[in-house]
Amino acid sequence: MWQLLKPLRLSRRAWLAGWLLALSVGGPVLAGPNTGTGPTGRFSRAVVEVGQPLDYVLSYAHDPAEEVVFPDSLAPFGTFEYAGRHWLPTRTTSGRSLDQAVYHLRTFSLAPVQSLQLPVLLLRGTADTLRLLPAVAQVRLHRLAPTLYTTDAAGPPTLRTTYQVLPLAPAFNYPFWLAGLAGGLALAGGAWALYGRRWRQRYGRYKRRKNHLYFLAQFARNAERFTLSRSAAVVERTVVLWKNYLSSLEDTNLNSLTTKELTEYFHNDEDVRRALRATDRVVYGNLLSEDAQEVDAAFQRLRDFAERQYERIFTA
């Protein structure tokens, strides 16, 4: 069981013998000579700063037959913080054994004087334990921060009110805007990866619809010019306009194809075959005066075929 230190009842002869024996024993490595009959504890320095490493040396000279237990990391270190320890080998000289432990500590307390007292346990059999306490070791705290006022009555210094606030020019926050730009680019890239194909399709449809309306307007204007002028040049320009529009719609080069090749390309479509034959007779055969109404019908067939091709590609 854990017990408090019992008073040692020593005779005068035994007390004198103990002192002589202690004087004859050589001193320990870190703590210096141990001249008492109980454990001794001391700090490695007298003054310490906040957070500065500090060693506490605990030593005990005893009979070699005695079983001694030193404190571990769970000991009550008080205002100190445990940071480690190491043991020194036992030294036996003239019938006395010296055990020594060094505890590495730190303190973050602001108390001006701090003390520590670690016990040493002496085991006596299986049912008795003697708790030996060394003298209290003290260390003084060295403050580095200056003291603003020395007494409690004196409050903090009075703030000056005559200072004039100077305007500061706003600085451009480059990291913030660069981070925002990178985030915007990443968001735009993700949106393009998810919806880019759909957006391209919608833009392609919008472009085809716009081109188709422009073609219909130009084709109607040429047909109106032909009605007023009955000119073969207008017929030729109208056929060229039709070929150019189908070339952009089909994404092929149809301008250089002849009437026969165009008819075969469009799978011998009846409207294409009859309309191109009628326009060829006007452009190359100069037969406009004989059948002008057939040219008007050819224009209508070319227009209807262009609209069918647009609907087929647009719906696909």
Image: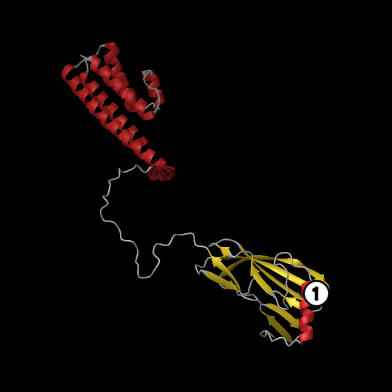
Q: Which image quadrant: the N terminus?
A: bottom right
Tally of marks: 1
Image quadrant of residue 65? bottom right
What is the x, y in percent for residue 151?
39, 69
In this view, the residue in front, 70 or 302, is: 70
Residue 236 in sight from this viewpoint: yes
For disc 1, the marked residue is 96
What is the x, y in percent for residue 135?
64, 76
Residue 71 in sight from this viewpoint: no
What is the three-letter code of the residue carrying label 1?
A: Arg
- Residue lying farthest to the right in this orientation: 94
Looking at the image, residue 58 sits to the left or right of residue 166; the answer is right
Q: Residue at x 60, y 61 (%)?
A: 53
Image quadrant of residue 261? top left
Q: Residue at x 26, y 15 (%)?
A: 282
In this view, the residue in front, 226 or 75, is: 75
